Amino acid sequence: MHPTSPAQFEASQAGAIPEPERVRDDVWALAQRMPGGYLPYSLLYLLRDSDGAFHVIDPGWNSPENWATVTDVLGTLGASVADVRSITATHLHPDHIGLAARLREASGAPLQLHETEAVAIGSPFETPADANATALQLDAWGVPNVRRAEILRVTHQASRFVPPATDRTLVDGERLDIPGFDLCAMLTPGHTSGHLCLRDDERSLLFTGDHLLPMMYAGLGLGAPSDTNPLADYLTSLERVSGYPDHEVLPGHGYRFQGVVDRAAETAEHHRRRSREVATVLADAPDSSTWQIASRLTWSAGWPKLEDFLLYSALAQTEMHRDYLASTVVGS
Ligand SMILES: [Zn+2]
């Protein structure tokens, strides 16, 4: 894997925000700031079609500053928000789709997602029943009483995000209606169950959202509940994007890069290693709770430092590996 944008790479390493930049004649990348300090920015992609109109992929977090970034860049290109014709989101997370409602309202452009993701958006995460379900899940995971409040707070906050209405749904293999582009939707479940990558074979571009990232391994199973194991789905989705070895990857965070095959292999190995680690803990102590397993795994921040969302995510990932192990034999 090697970065294809030195500016994005350097900003990513320094925790800074890169300037908007041109990726191809008619494709731009805009860094959109994120609150919270966990990741500094997401990447919005702006496409100019052969009629001179614009199309947005992953608008980013909803903030006045991010709105100004989009309108400023459109302005420098001699256009305005009224020239936006479509908004496509790779998945339903607020750092990708948050600004979509404002953009949709101002431009009249339809918002589109994969049909699975659109259904998930239509069902609120937090109802009284869901709050109960979260509490029961924490019981099942063996979360100590002193740590329950912070996790319940996180899941409640996540539920306060009101996703925008979806106008169109996309299916796997569908060509997006963008004149001058042959952009194909690829269903890549794992990070969320309806996550989409977008592929442009003519320009050799692969928009990967949070499916494949250069500087971190995104969590899995972070969307609507699925009947299938997110890790099993994810490993298949990684193989899928590996079928385009010469495409430049335009990810949802970090920096663009070449080398999708290597990065997908590293990412798969990261998750397989984690499964083996969970298997080792279970071999030693088969009755461990999810909390007990997670506390014995290696975490880059260190287990004692995991708090709030990161703690919730760590427990959810541990549970997913445990399920995966129960349903398959993990190779060494
Ligand atoms: Zn995401």
Image (cartoon, helix red, strand yellow):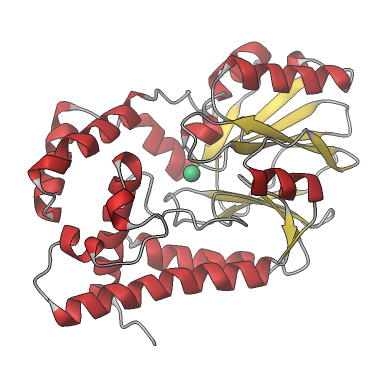
Residue 154 x %, y %: 29, 34
Residue 261 x %, y %: 66, 71
Residue 147 x %, y %: 16, 42
In depth, the one of 107 and 137 nearer the eye is: 137
Quadrant (top left, top right, bottom left, bottom right) of the N terminus: bottom right
- Residue at image point 63% right, 31% down: 32
Q: Residue furthest bottom?
A: 332
- Residue at image point 33% right, 41% down: 309
- Residue at image point 61% right, 51% down: 197
Q: Can residue 239 be seen in the rendering of this structure?
A: no
Quadrant (top left, top right, bottom left, bottom right) of the C terminus: bottom left
Residue 63 drawn above or below residue 179:
above
- Residue at image point 85% right, 41% down: 180
Residue 311 drawn above or below residue 280:
above
Q: Is residue 144 left or right of residue 192?
A: left
Q: Is residue 221 left or right of residue 63?
A: left
Residue 35 drawn above or below residue 255:
above
Q: Can residue 49 be seen in the rendering of this structure?
A: yes
Tally the marks: 0
Residue 87 x %, y %: 64, 30
